[in-house]
Amino acid sequence: MSMHFADAAAGEDFLLGRLPHESKSGSVQSPCNILQQKQPSCQPQAVDEAVTGSLRYFLRAISIADHGCRLGIKVQCNAQGHVTFLDLSAPRRMSGGGASNVRIVLILLCEDMELNGRLSEKLGQLSALEEIHLDHNFLRGSIPSQLGYLAARSTGRTGELGSLRMLSLDNNVLTGEIPRALGQLTSLRWLLLWRNLLSGEIPAELGQLKSLSRLHLQHNHLGGHIPKEFGRLQALEQLRMFDNQLEGEIPKEMGQLEALQELRLSDNRLSGEIPAELGNLRRLKLLSLSNNKLNGSIPKELGELKSLQRLELMVNQLEGEIPKEMGQLEALQEPRLSDNRLSGEIPAELGNLRRLKLLSLSNNKLNGSIPKELGELKSLQRLELMVNQLEGEIPKEMGQLEALQELRLSDNRLSGEIPAELGNLRRLKLLSLSKNKLNGSIPKELGELKSLQRLELMVNQLEGEIPKEMGQLEALQELRLSDNRLSGEIPAELGNLRRLKLLSLSNNKLNGSIPKELGELKSLQQLRLQSNNLMGEIPKELGNLSLLQELLLTRNRLKGHIPRHLGALRSLQLLEVDKNHLEGTIPKELGSLKRLTRLNLDQNRLSGPIPAELGQLFSVTTISFEENQLTGCIPGELGELKLLRALSLRENQLCGRIPPELAKLGENGQLHDLYLSQNQLSGAIPQELGYLQQLRDLSLRSNNFTGSIPKSLGKLKNLKELYIDHNQLTGEIPLELGDLPQLRSLYLDHNQLQGSIPAALMKLKRLTRLSLGENRLTGALPSFLPLASLLELSLQRNRLHGPLLSVPQRC
C-alpha cells in the first residue's frame, strides 16, 4: 500500500500531509524509519494523519527551479499499515518545459513533537537535507556517525546537492560521544546538541567546520580538554559549553576567534589562568567563565574588549588586584567577579563605566575604602560589595546613584555613620549594611525611600532611637535592626507598614511596652523582639496577626498574663516568651495552634495546671515549661504528640505519677529528651518508658519516686544521660543498665538502693560520670572500678569495702 502525493510546483512551500492524495499502489522506499518507531495503522485516505498527526513528522520541501519543474514526493505504508518510506527522488520535467539547473532544498522539521526512539544511520542517506530540526523531543541512543554523509556533494549536472547547514538535536536524551564524522559537514552553520546526556571528549575534528557560527554543547556530560583546534572556527559567533565536565586550561587559541560574540564556559572544571589572548576578541559581548577552578590574576588585556557587555568570572580561585584597565570597558553592563580571592583596593577607574547596571565584587578579600567615584555610575542598579574587608566610611556620593535598586555592603569593616544622602535613592529596594562597625543613629532620611522593601542594619553599633519616619516606608517587607545598641521605645508608627513580613529588633536596649499598633501588621509573618528591656503586657492585639509564624519575645521584662487571643494565630510555628515575668495560667486556647512546632514558656512565674488541650498540638516538636510554678499532674494527652522530640517540665511543682501514655511518644521514635526533674512527682517509674527507643536524655532527679529502677530502661540503646538521683528508690541496680552502649552519665545517688554494684556496668565503655553515693550498697568494690573512661566517680556513704584502684593517668 502506498500513497503518491500530488506534485508540488516549483517555488511552492508546503507541509507534507496537507497535500491532496491519490489511492494508487506503487513501489517506493521511505525514510520514515529514521526514528525506528512503529506508527499507528494508516489507511490510504489517512496517510496525511499518520504522518502529521501520529508520527508528527514534518517535511517542508522548497523547490527552486525553472517554471516547469515539479518535485515528486511519495509515502509508502507496509502491510501492517506502518509508514515505512518517504521518497525524496530527484525532480522530473513537466511536458512542455525543462529544468536545466534545479536545486532541491529539504528541511526536516520535527521539533517539540514528543518523538521517541533512536536516530537511524539511514538519516545520512537523505542527501538533499540542508536543515535537521529534531530538538525538544525524547530521542535516545547515540548520534549516528552517518550524519557526516550529509556534506556537500557534487552532482555534476546540477552542481552541489545537499550540504547540511543546520543540525539541531538539543533537548533530547541522546547519549554516547559526539561523532568525529560531524567534522565533515563543512557547510554547517549551526550545531545545536545542548541539554542531552552526551559524554566523552569533544572531537577536535569540529575545528574543521569553517562556516560554523553557533556551537551549543551546554548541559551535557562532556569531559576532557577544550580542543585547541577550535581556534580555526573563524566564523564562530557563539560558543556555549557550560555545565559540562571539561578540564584543563582554556586554549590560548581561543583568542583567534575574531567573530566571537559569546564565550560561555561556566560550570566546568577548567583550571589554570585566563589566557591574555582573549583580549583580542574585539567583538565579544559576553564572557562567562564562572564556577570553575581558574586561578592567577585577571588579565589586564581584558580591558581591550570594547564590545564586552557581560563579564562573569565568579566562583573561581582568582587572585590579585582588579585591573584598573577594566575601567576602559565602556560597553560593560554586568561585571560579576564575586566568590574569588581578589585583593587590593577597588579601582577608582570603575567609575568610568557609565553603562554599568550591576557591579558584583562580593565574597573576596578586597580592602581599602569604597571609591567615591562609584557615585558617577548613573545607570547602576545593583552594587554588591558584601563579604570583603572594606574599611572607612560609606561615601556620601552613593546618594547620587539615582537608578540604584540594591545596595549590599554587609560583612565588611565599614565604620562611621550611615550617610543621610542615601535617603535620595528613591528607587532603592534593598539596603543591606549589616555586620559592619557602623555607629551613630539611623538617619531619619531613610524614611524617604518609598520603594524600599528590605532594610538590613543588624550587627552594627548603631545607637539612639528608631526614627518614627520608618513608618513611612509603605513598600517595606523586611526590617532587620537586631544586634545593635538601639534604645528608646518601639515607634507606634511601625504599625503603618502594612506590607511588612518580618520585623526583627532583637538584641538591643529597647524599652517601654510593645505597641498595640503592631497588631495592624496584617502581612507580618515574623516578629522578633527578644533580648531587650521591654516591659508591660503582651498586647492582645497581636492575636490579629493571622499570618504570623514566629513570635519571639524571650529575655525581656514582660509581665501580666499570656493573652488567650494568641490562640487565634493559626499560622504560628514558633512561640517563645521565656525568661520574662509572666504570671497566671497557660491559656488552653494555645491548644488551637495546630502548626506550632516550638512552645517555650521557660523561666516565668506561670502557675496552675498544664492544659490538656496542649495534647492537640500535633505539629509540635519542643515543649519547654522549665522554672515556673506549675502544679497538678502531667496530662496524659501529651502522649498524643507524635512529633515531640523534647519535653522539659523541670523545676516546677508538678505532682502525681508519670502518665504511662507518654510511652506513645516512642511509637514513631521521635522523643529524644525528657526532663521531669525537681518536681513533686511520685509513684513508681513506669516500665513503659522503656518504649522510648530514641531517648537520649532522661532526667527524673529530685522527685519522690519509689519502688525499683525499671529493668526496661536497659532497652534505651541510644540513652546518653540518665539522672534518677535524689529520689526514694529501692531494690538493686538492674543488670540491664549495662546494656546501654551510649551511656555517658549515670546518676543513682541519694536513693535507698541495696545490693552490690553489678559487674555488668563494666560494659559501659563510654561512661564518664558514675554517681552511686548516699545509698545502701554493700559488698566489695568491683575489680573493674574505676573504668578507664571515668572522669567522675562517687561512691560515698555506702557499705562497700575493699581497695579502689587509682584512675589511670591520661596523656
Image: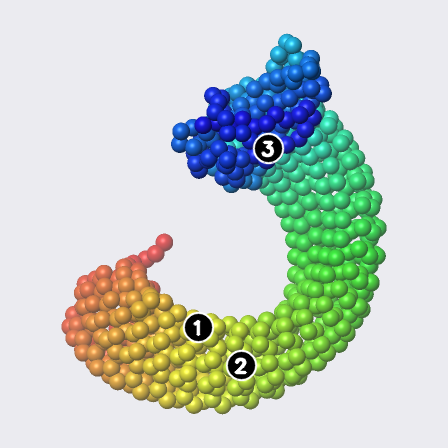
Q: Which amino acid does label 2 sit on?
A: Ala
Label 1: how many Cα within 10 Å (few below 14, some 14–19, many 20+): many
Percent x, y for residue 485?
68, 72
Q: Residue at x 48, y 33 (%)?
A: 44
Which is nearer the eye, 138 or 180?
Answer: 138
**Residue underneath mark 3:** 19
Disc 1 vs disc 2: which is toward the camera? 2
Q: Residue at x 27, y 70 (%)?
A: 691
**Residue underneath mark 1:** 620
- On screen, residue 39 versus residue 311, left or right, reads left
Question: Where 277 sits versus 40, above or below?
Answer: above
Q: Are marks 1 and 3 in contact (CB under 8 Å)?
A: no
Q: What residue type is labelled 3?
A: Leu
Picture quadrant where residue 546 is located: bottom right
Q: Is mark 2 on a helix, strand or loop?
A: helix
- Check residue 568 in the rendering and tell me which mark sits there, or answer none: 2
